[in-house]
Amino acid sequence: MQNLDQDKYEVIPIYISKSGGWVIGNNKFLTPESYKDLDKLISGTKQLSLLPPKPLPKIDVAFPVFHGPFGEDGTIQGFLEMLNIPYVGSGVLGSSLGMDKVLQKQVFSSHNLPQVKHLWFYRDNLPKSVSLKYPLYVKPANGGSSIGTTKVHSSKELNDALEIAACYDRKIIVEESAEGFNEINISVLGNSGSKLRTSVCEQPVPSKEVLTFSDKYESGSSKSAGMASAKRLIPAPIKPATAAKISDLAKTAFESLDCSGLARVDFLVSPDEKTIYINEINTIPGSLAFYLWQASNIPFPKLLDELIQLALTSHEDKNKTTYTFANNLLANLGETLKGNKLKG
Ligand SMILES: Nc1ncnc2c1ncn2[C@@H]1O[C@H](COP(=O)(O)OP(=O)(O)O)[C@@H](O)[C@H]1O
Ligand SMILES: [Mg+2]
């Protein structure tokens, strides 16, 4: 704080105490010596609240059901974390990794999960050509619902596809198409580090080559029925051994990202079922993938009960971790910074 140019910046010290209270500091907070006696430092300061002035009702469990950035990517999860409110589903890390197709692929490959070949780029550094085998899929890294995703059949189409994807994200992924493969999805239920269960598999039936936004959300009799109304085969018409393999891979994927609650893991499977690629994970899948659990003898209300129980267990588990340390590291700050003080 002392080293911020005081002519340029007005520094407002904010201190978070070990008990979790936020206070707005006064001038004393700019002097390292003040930190030797924290109680004295904090006394008489104003409480700070980042929350809206209206108090929240008492919430036992929050149930985030969003798609996309801010809801599915760890942001709202981080907010609930700060409020110490138990919440359903993956935490900050699992959610953000689950949202980022590039980083999840990197974690998956470190767990030897089979994937198509891919490259990724920041949008300010887009390539003119790529050393991958066409056809390719070009996608925004943090997209969803196929928005901004294009199948590219030749190098002539690459540039436009990259630019479309770049409208939706700073990060773009380009991957080889698993030609003629079938999409097979499965849901995982549980908390990483504890027993995980998997549902039956489904095979969504696309109307075109890419499962579109419309296939996912608008194809059923009711436009509001979401993923549950898309055309699909449940259970997927695959061999039991393939389904078992997919179940194992899905559990590994879920645990590798430290997911909690529920996720749907999507695979691409060759017609002879000899090659299985993991495509992506969805930490808040469409319709919570309840239809997969229903087909696995877990009715929707029971699934919700289990998710709420998993949220409470995961919250209890987090609170077992020690986050404070009975030591005032700041007490010696004055010594460390000696000779580094602002004049006046
Ligand atoms: N590498 C690929 N090979 C074959 N089909 C793909 C590939 N990548 C994506 N697809 C098709 O595009 C759709 C959308 O891509 P996906 O990675 O699942 O992104 P989204 O987050 O938009 O669901 C998939 O459901 C599948 O139909
Ligand atoms: Mg998908």
Image (cartoon, grey):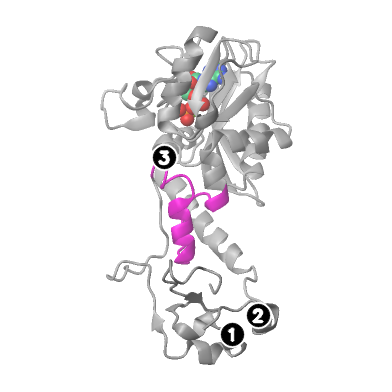
Q: Do the residues bearing badges 2 and 1 touch, measured as CB atoms within 8 Å?
A: yes
Does residue 318 sit above or below 132 in this rendering?
A: below
Task: Report the residue that reaches farthest toward the front.
Answer: 343
Whether residue 252 is visible here, answered yes or no, is yes
Does residue 154 sit above or below 323 in this rendering?
A: above
Left or right, residue 36 beside residue 12: right
Q: Nearer the viewer, mark 3 or mark 2?
A: 2
Q: Residue at x 68, y 27 (%)?
A: 245
Q: Within 10 angstroms of label 3, few (less than 14), some, or many (20 or more) residues?
A: few
Say whether residue 157 is magenta: no
Of 164 and 266, which appears nearest the observer?
A: 164
Q: Label 1 vs label 3: CA separation?
A: 42 Å
Task: Report the amino acid beneath label 1.
Answer: Tyr
- Which of marks 3 and 1 precedes in the sequence? 1
Q: Do the residues bearing badges 1 and 3 touch, measured as CB atoms within 8 Å?
A: no
Mark drawn on residue 333: 2
Query: Label 1 belongs to which residue?
Result: 35
**Quarter holding residue 178:** top right
- Which of marks 2 and 3 precedes in the sequence? 3
Q: Label 3 vs label 2: CA separation?
A: 42 Å
Secondary element at tag 1:
helix
What is the span of residues highlighted in magenta in the rendered image? 66-93
Does residue 71 sit above or below 268 in this rendering?
A: below
Whether residue 261 is visible here, answered yes or no, is no
Q: Nearer the viewer, mark 1 or mark 3?
A: 1
Q: Label 2 vs label 1: CA separation?
A: 7 Å
Query: Label 3 belongs to which residue?
Result: 68
Q: Residue at x 43, y 53 (%)?
A: 76
Task: Tell me where residue 342 appears, x and y as whole percent.
Answer: 56, 78
